[in-house]
Image (cartoon, rainbow, N blue to C red):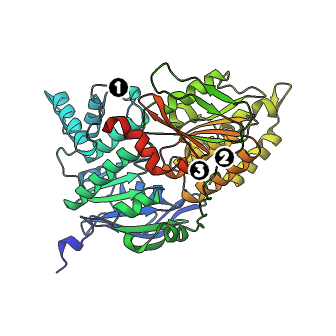
Amino acid sequence: MQDPQDIPVFAVDGASKSFGAVRALAGVDFSVRGGECVGLVGHNGAGKSTLVNVITGGLRLDAGSIRLAGQDETARYAIREAHAHGVRCVFQELSLCPNLTVTENTRISHAALRGPGWRRRAEALIRGTLDDIFPGHGIDCRQTISTLSIAERQMVEIATAFSETDAPVKLVILDEPTSSLDASLAAQLLAYVRRFVGGGGAVVLISHILGEILSAADRVVVMKDGKVVAERPAGEFSIDTLVGAMGSVVRARDAARHGPDVTGLAPVLRQKARPRARAIEFVAYPGEIVGLAGLGGHGQTQTLVSLFMAQGGDWLAPRDGKVAFVAGDRHVDGNLPLWSILRNMTIGLLPDLTRFGLVDERREQAVARAWRERIDVRTQDLANPILSLSGGNQQKVLFARALATRAPVVLMDDPMRGVDIGTKQEVYHMLRAEADKGRTFVWYSTEMDEICQCDRVYVFREGRIAAELTGADITEERVLAASFAEQAA
């Protein structure tokens, strides 16, 4: 008789799913057991999102079978059945209702919270789970979602998925759960994942931050072109071998840079320090890649916006704009959801593509095709809606929109959230090549590897610049020390 612990909480065998001519899943076998965290990795377009939608009941298979706790559920499996069996998901594209409070969003996700006193019970539930996962989170559950930062929204979504009411949570899928979280919040989440798994729960962790996968997962499944191409215990992978299994080659990190020689150059951006003790002035010179670091929500995004506005920022691009902006929250500040991929990519270039008030469509398509190839946007037709792309590919479109302009300064608000490691490496190389030509990049990132690509780094704390690092001083240890210095004092 089979040991119950060996029976997967969820399993698919021979899973196949196509969308027109695109075969998203091609005979995938995948399972996850109670008491284990499975890391699921692959480039954007590898089939991960499709597999997630199959697990959550949002998509029906063209072929293959689905088993829950050893029972064949293929014929009737849908969202209702997935939820009843304790399957939860934190999607990369957050699903909270922005006009409702944290408590009210909790009620939507948990039908058992009904009747007199539901609001009190819902608030106690979500607050308790937030406290368990993110101690000291500081989120008021009576706030509307629209007033929260993107990191706080991600924390609420994660806590909602792990909250229990009428049915136990057996399997939680985390799709890029730390993409908007700083290092300390990410560490809190991954520690909770290990506690949840230690108590018999199951987790599928999807992340392009491969160090997180190797530290939190028991087993790693690698997908490529709709197929599983590698599967083995996490301890048998290194970052290099994991990247290799995905089909990329690891670029060696450049030796510590000392940045361009800015002697005698005038800054292209300058922002005076606020009149507070020990505050540091922000400056950026031609050809520099300047990083904004520190714990999330300490003023980095606000600084980018103020720099943009100080340069005559206008979301309708002029012919020779001084700055281009890559938004961090693509749903609020980036995507034009009713437009095509092509139009989302070229809107920043309309002054160059327009003659006598008409867009030269031939030139527009040529530019869009060139950037699709250059940054590997996974689509067969640029006329498709922007929302037809995966989250990572949507982010690539926003990045291409800014980089395709002639603006000498590009401001980037965590632009590579959800972008695969192969594309990130190509972008790093592209940024450096553009900087070597004199272009300036100001880059807020929650990923330490990206901060370490910069020539100059400003570490933010409590709304101001607390430290300035350059060259060999740009290390994870120094950034973290500057982020927490006063808090530890």
Residue 157 vs residue 482, the one in the foreground? 482
Residue receiving disc 3: 453
Q: Name the element at disc 3.
A: loop
The picture quadrant where one finds residue 157 is: top left
Going by the numbered disc 1, the residue's amino acid type is Thr
Residue receiving disc 1: 144
Q: Relative to 382, does residue 355 appear above or below in the rendering?
A: above
For the residues bearing labels 1 and 2, Cβ distance under 8 angstroms: no
Residue, x 50% and y 62% (percent of image)?
A: 42
Q: Which mark is residue 369?
A: none
**Cα distance in 3D space between marks 3 and 2:** 10 Å
The picture quadrant where one finds residue 402 is: top right
Residue lying at the far bottom of the rendered structure: 1
Q: Counting residues from the N terminus, which is met first, the one under dot 1 or under dot 2?
A: 1
Q: Relative to 198, does residue 180 appear above or below in the rendering?
A: above
Quadrant of the drawing holding the C terminus: top left
For the residues bearing labels 3 and 2, Cβ distance under 8 angstroms: no
| 120 with respect to 271 (left or right) | left
